Amino acid sequence: MNKNVCPNCGQLYDADLEKCPLCGTAAQVVEAESAALRKQRRAERKEAERQKNDSFDQESEEDLLEEEAARKREEKRMRKEAKRAVQTVETEESERVPAPAAITPGAYQTGGRRPAVQEEYIRKDRSRVPRFFLVVSFLLLLAALAVGGTYLLWKKDIVKLPIYDNLFEKYHSTEAPIETGEPAATDTAQAAASSSAVDTETVDPYSGAKPCTGMTLSMTELTLTYRNDLEQIVATVEPRDTTDQRTYVSSDENVAKVTSVGVVTAVNPGTATITVTCGKQTATCTVTCDFSDETEAPQDVTVDVDSLELNDTDMDITFFNPGENFTLSVTNIPVGTPVTWTSQDPAIATVDEGGHVVAVSKGTTKVLAKVGDLTAECWVRCNFKEETSATGG
């Protein structure tokens, strides 16, 4: 089969056409090449290209080396020029800006441009500080763990450490402290109370408990001469900072009552025993209520007033601590007129025949003033703190 090839554009088309269908150039007849011929020509072209490439590689190896050397020389020259340009700029800036102060390790310049070497030194100097503290903190933590671990092993009696044994004997002695400032007790009952046997039971030194080892009372016998008369029994304990609580108990509250802070109130004639306990220490005080000298106010007293007026115009007294007191009086009656004073609850507050009111324990009660058929009332409020009312004196 014959083909025409366009000499102008190279288009291959059928030989039946007289012109190139693409550009219109007159046709030239080219015989179709056989496949074998085309294959031979391709092989020849490949061989020629291979030979050409081999010759090029051999001839251009030296050229490539020379080009690489020239490229390196050019890069070196360009770096020198860049460095020279930077130095020129720094010189110009230094002429315009005053020279900065000398840089010390860890400090910055106050102005101007910092050299790269000095900045790197400053950066390294900054990094040393946190590293130092990290190392010190780590060592302290290791030391604390070591001390704590050995202490726990010693406390569990797993290992024996003489240093801990010595410290324990020095600061955790269970012997009662000797107090030389207290006056010696002369009364037989006081001596018996102070010579009570010391509890020898083993106390855990780590519990914080301090048992009472001795106790004396301010009095072992007490006489109250009129109803609602009061007196306080003070218990002195050893050691003073003992954790044991003091308790006061009356053997007969119909005769004498006692509060948690040792205030005794006369109720009826007779004899009662107040027992004071602190831990395993016990002491007693005998209370005698003798009202033989008590004078009763006359009941037929009359006054020319419609009501009684007290000196406490608010008719309300508030106490904040046991033992606080206030004296009431009736102000609108003649001087010397007998007044009968009574407390509705002597366990909270007591009042004597002269109107002297004393706080005893927490609570609220009334104090009454009576003259003939007239009566005046005064509220008494004892607002003690919890620890004050619950702890022994």
Image (tube, helix red, strand yellow):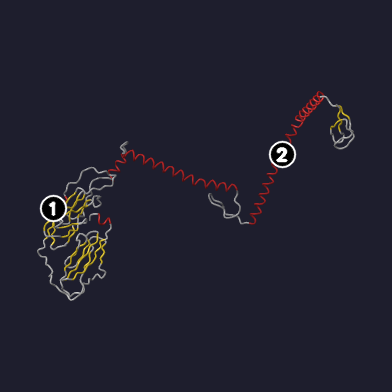
Residue appearing at x 25%, y 44% in the figure: 203
Q: Nearer the viewer, residue 181 or 377?
A: 377
Check contact, mark 2 vs mark 1: CB within 8 A.
no
The answer to whether 292 is drawn above or below residue 122 in the figure is below
Q: Position of residue 147 (x, y in %)?
A: 36, 41
Q: Position of residue 323 (x, y in %)?
A: 22, 61
Quadrant containing the C terminus is bottom left
Helix, strand or loop at label 2? It is helix
Q: Amino acid at mark 2?
A: Arg
Residue 71: which disc? 2
Q: Amino acid at mark 1?
A: Ala
Left or right: where does residue 117 sit relative to residue 339? right
Q: Nearer the viewer, mark 2 or mark 1?
A: 1
Q: Earlier in the sequence, mark 2 or mark 1?
A: 2
**Separation (CA) of disc 2 from disc 1:** 117 Å
Residue on which disc 1 sits: 189
